[in-house]
Image (cartoon, rainbow, N blue to C red):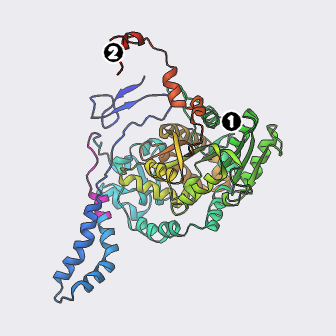
Amino acid sequence: MAEEKTTANGSAGPVQGFRTTNYPAIANPPFPAEGSAAFSNYQLAFCLFFGPWLVQKILPFRTGWYFYFFLFLILGVPIAIGYWTFKSKYGARLNEKAVFPGKPLNTYITLKDDKLKKYNSTNKKIPMQVFHDAYFAGKADFNGDVLEVMEWRHDWASFEFTPELFKYVLFNLIPDVIIHSQSQDEEQVRDHYDRGDDFYSWFLGPRMIYTSGVISDINKMETLEELQDNKLKMVCEKLDLKPTDKMLDIGCGWGTLATFAGKNYGCDVTGVTLAKNQTQFGNQRLRENGVPESQGRILCMDYRDIPHSKGYFNKISCLEMAEHVGIRRYGTFLKEVYDLLDDDGLLVFQVAGIRTCWQFEDLNWGLFMNKYVFPGADASLPLGWVIKQLESANFEIKTVDVLGVHYSATIHRWYLNWVSNKDKVVAKYGERWYRIWVYFLAYSVMQGSASVFQITAHKNLNAFHRVEGVTSHGNVLYHTAKKAEPVISHQEMWADQTLH
């Protein structure tokens, strides 16, 4: 394997409190530094309540509680913004194990805009939001490979909350979360996924799968196609697919999972997507792989309009679509999935999310993703929240696999594909779209900020025959299948013990 001792500047030498790896399966991070997580709800609450009281005390007149509550209402947002700004800019790092090299800013990036050159003259870190907006506009550049420079981002960028980020949260994100209508979903999904199949093929490759693959061997750099085929098989095995099954794939993308399931397991399969291009592509893929319309079809519709009665499907997959449902409708969506599933059915539910104990960098990254890549996908939340929502919809959790490192490996392949197709992208879609996506893919390779959870579940009913799921209980079978010489035999273990 694969362990390298690394100094803060990347050269071989004494360990600086962390270790690096060199596994072929992933893009091994050379500088896994921690950022600031110095946020406290208690501190924020104190500021919100103490601030108006202090202002009231300073003013030369007193008007009692009514005036206090008036000040609380008008000062609440400015105080909260001030607290977030201060903590994101000056808050202590989670730990100091990774020592910053402290190289000049122009070692990593080039700032072309005169307004930005102040960061060069003062040699202070540039806010990440300020940099990526400038990069997309052609006013800044990376000095070298984007992924390699981004790996050292903590040495040249800060993750403070800027006025632009607050503006986006207040006037875009919050209204989207509150409203999140069906028409909004349709508009955002089609604007994103109907951009052009060629756009997506230039990083997704021939499988056209926009979800995480799965590593099978950490000592080998598997191809993108191998990673995705590993995932397709794993999902189908977790669903325990049989020719008699009726499978539904919600948010089916370009129909690759539906095609794989129909072709290799013989089940009847229905995929739904809001994107017109995906619908056409998916149906063509089904036919090219010998799955007739009577057995498999991709429907262009909202999941709320699926034309089947309750319990029609006994196998349902939903891979990285629920993020688009939105926080407001998440519980309702899961209850609708519950109703579509047969009482003896299985659900494989894969969703991207963030860690519970977030760092300010995570929020910067999430807001970038919401604005530029996945507008409306506001339901990327911690695993605990997702599990609670599933259980509240009366699902019982069978297995959970956290696939964050697998996603990192997958996106690394996407990144390499995208960079290799730069000329094609720029020629058809322009430099800006290339830059947005190369930044998105490079940043998404980084491990830690976000992850993806693959959850297998079924209805929490007394009549559900749980024993029949043992043969597809992957984690249990993996460990029990391992052959090892016992330290002491079973007979010897119990020989001197009496059961009472």
Lateral position of residue 69 relative to residue 199, left or right: left
On-image quarter of the C terminus = top left
Q: Is residue 443 visible?
A: yes
Q: Which residue is mark 1?
A: 241
Mark number displayed over residue 497: 2
Residue toward you, 161 or 113: 161
Position in image of residue 251 (x %, y %) = 65, 51
Residue toward you, 80 or 36: 80
Residue toward you, 271 or 430: 271
**Residue 166 occupies quadrant:** bottom left
Position in image of residue 407 (x %, y %) = 52, 40
Residue at figure coordinates x 41%, y 52% from the top left: 362
Residue at figure coordinates x 39%, y 36% from the top left: 30
Q: Amino acid at mark 1?
A: Leu
Give, as a single range, the part of the protein colored magenta.
Answer: 84-97
Lateral position of residue 482 relative to residue 193, left or right: left
Disc 1: CA contacts within 10 A as few (<14), some (14-19) or many (>=20): many
Q: Amino acid at mark 2?
A: Gln
* 3D distance between C-alphas at marks 2 and 1: 44 Å
Question: Does 43 appear in magenta?
Answer: no
